[in-house]
C-alpha cells in the first residue's frame, strides 16, 4: 500500500471521529443563548459537564440532582429534582424529597389539594402534614415596605439578608405595636411568628400582648443562646417560635411585643419576624 493511500485513510478516519463526536448526543459542554439549534433534533441530550442557561428553558421532562437557573423554568410535564434553586417555577408535576423554607415559614397562596390517602386531617403528630381551617389574614416578614405598615417602629435589623423588626441597638425596654384591622367574621384568632432574644439576657422575659393582655411569655438566658447572630459582630441569640390561639370575634386586634430588659439596647435587645395573623 502506498504512503499516499495510507495517509488518505488516516485523514478519513480522523474526519469520521470528529464527525461522530460533533453529532453525538453526549455533550461535554454546552453554552447557548437560545435553543434554536436543538429544536429540530429529536434525540435526547446528555450533558456531562457545564450547562449554562442564559435565557429561558422550556422542556417536557427534567430529571437532575442539582439545578440552578437565573431566568425562568417552565416544565410542561414532569420534574424530578433533588436540589433546586430558582426564582420562578411553572410546572404541572414536581417530585421533591424535602421542602425546607429558608426563613422557617412556608407560605402557600391558594388552595392546597392532597390526594394521598395516607395523609389525614387529625391530631396525630406522626402525620406528615395537618390541615386546619385557619385563614391567613396578614403576614409580615419585613422584607418589603408593605410589611412595615401599621407598626409603631420601622427600624430594621438584618442577618444573612433576612430582615427583622428591631434588633441590636434598636429595641430593648420599649414595646412595639400594631393594630390589625378589618378582620373577617371569625370565632378564633391565631398569632404566630419568631421572637429573637439578642445579646446579654439573664432571665429577662420577652412577651406578646393581645389587646393589652399578656398571652405569651418566655424567659431568656445567654447561657443557652447560639453564637454568630451577626456576621460582622458576633452576638449570642435565641430564635423562639411562638404560636398563640384564643377566642376572638372583633374585627380588629391590638398586638404588642416587649421585654423586661433595661434601656441598654446595645447590650441586649429583641426583634420580631414572620408575624402571621390567622382567623377561623
Image (cartoon, rainbow, N blue to C red):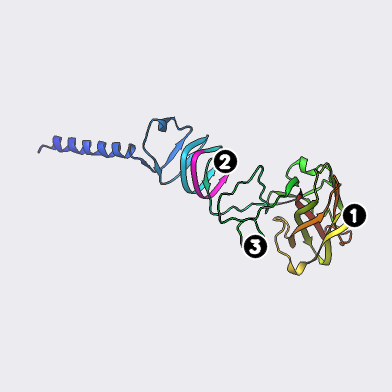
Of residues 88 and 164, the one drawn nearer to the viewer in this rendering: 88
Whichever of callouts 1 and 3 sits on the residue coming sooner in the sequence is 3
Whether residue 144 is in magenta: the answer is no
Element type at mark 1 = loop
Q: What span is in magenta?
A: 75-90
- What residue is shown at x 53% (from left), y 51% (from top)? 96
| Image point (61%, 53%), residue name | 100
> Which residue of the protein is positioned furthest toward the left in this rendering?
1
- Left/right placement of residue 157 relative to residue 96 reads right
User: Of marks 3 and 2, which one's residue comes earlier in the chain?
Assistant: 2
State the SS at label 2. Answer: strand
**Looking at the image, which is closer to me, 31 or 279?**
279
Q: Position of residue 122 (x, y in %)?
A: 65, 58
Residue underneath mark 1: 212
Q: Nearer the viewer, mark 1 or mark 3?
A: 3
Mark 3 element type: loop
Query: Quick one: which residue is furthest to the bottom in this view?
Result: 223
The span from disc 1 to disc 2 (Cα, nearest Å) is: 43 Å
Horizontal arrangement in the rendering, residue 157 relative to residue 80 (left or right): right
Does the stretch in magenta take in 87?
A: yes
Image quadrant holding the N terminus, namely: top left
Examine the rendering and report whether any part of residue 168 can be seen.
Answer: no
Residue 125 percent across, percent down from the top left: 65, 62
Residue 234 found in image quarter: bottom right
Frontmost residue, 215 versus 83: 215
Crowd rating for badge 3 (residues with CA inside 10 Å; few <14, some 14–19, many 20+)? few
Q: CA distance from mark 3 to mark 2?
A: 31 Å
Q: Which residue is mark 3?
A: 125
For label 2, count other residues whose C-alpha is less than 10 Å away and answer few (under 14), some (14-19) or many (20+).
few
The Cα atoms of the two marked residues, 1 and 3, are separated by 33 Å
Q: Which residue is at a point 29% across and 38% down the rendered structure image?
A: 20
Residue to which mark 2 is pinned: 89
Amino acid at each position: 500500500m502506498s504512503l499516499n493511500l495510507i495517509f488518505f485513510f488516516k485523514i478519513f478516519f480522523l474526519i469520521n471521529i470528529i464527525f461522530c463526536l460533533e453529532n453525538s448526543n453526549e455533550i461535554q459542554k454546552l453554552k447557548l443563548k437560545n435553543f434554536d439549534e436543538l429544536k429540530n433534533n429529536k434525540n435526547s441530550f446528555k450533558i456531562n459537564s457545564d450547562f449554562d442557561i442564559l435565557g429561558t428553558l422550556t422542556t417536557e421532562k427534567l430529571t437532575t440532582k442539582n439545578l440552578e437557573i437565573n431566568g425562568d423554568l417552565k416544565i410542561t410535564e414532569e420534574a424530578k429534582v433533588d436540589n433546586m434553586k430558582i426564582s420562578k417555577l411553572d410546572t404541572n408535576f414536581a417530585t421533591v424529597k424535602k421542602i425546607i423554607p429558608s426563613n422557617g415559614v412556608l407560605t402557600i397562596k391558594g388552595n392546597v389539594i392532597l390526594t394521598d390517602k395516607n395523609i389525614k386531617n387529625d391530631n396525630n403528630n406522626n402525620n406528615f402534614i395537618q390541615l386546619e381551617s385557619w385563614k391567613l389574614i396578614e403576614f409580615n416578614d419585613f422584607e418589603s415596605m408593605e410589611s412595615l405598615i401599621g407598626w409603631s417602629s420601622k427600624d430594621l435589623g438584618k442577618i444573612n439578608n433576612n430582615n427583622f423588626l428591631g434588633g441590636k441597638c434598636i429595641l430593648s425596654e420599649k414595646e412595639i405595636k400594631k393594630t390589625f384591622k378589618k378582620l373577617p367574621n371569625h370565632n378564633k384568632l391565631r398569632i404566630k411568628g419568631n421572637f429573637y432574644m439578642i445579646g446579654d439576657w439573664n432571665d429577662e422575659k420577652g412577651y406578646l400582648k393581645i389587646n393589652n393582655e399578656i398571652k405569651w411569655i418566655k424567659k431568656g438566658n445567654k447561657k443557652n443562646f447560639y453564637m454568630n447572630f451577626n456576621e460582622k459582630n458576633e452576638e449570642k441569640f435565641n430564635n423562639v417560635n411562638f404560636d398563640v390561639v384564643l377566642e376572638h370575634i372583633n374585627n380588629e386586634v391590638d398586638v404588642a411585643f416587649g421585654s423586661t430588659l433595661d434601656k441598654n439596647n446595645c447590650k441586649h435587645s429583641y426583634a420580631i419576624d414572620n408575624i402571621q395573623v390567622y382567623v377561623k
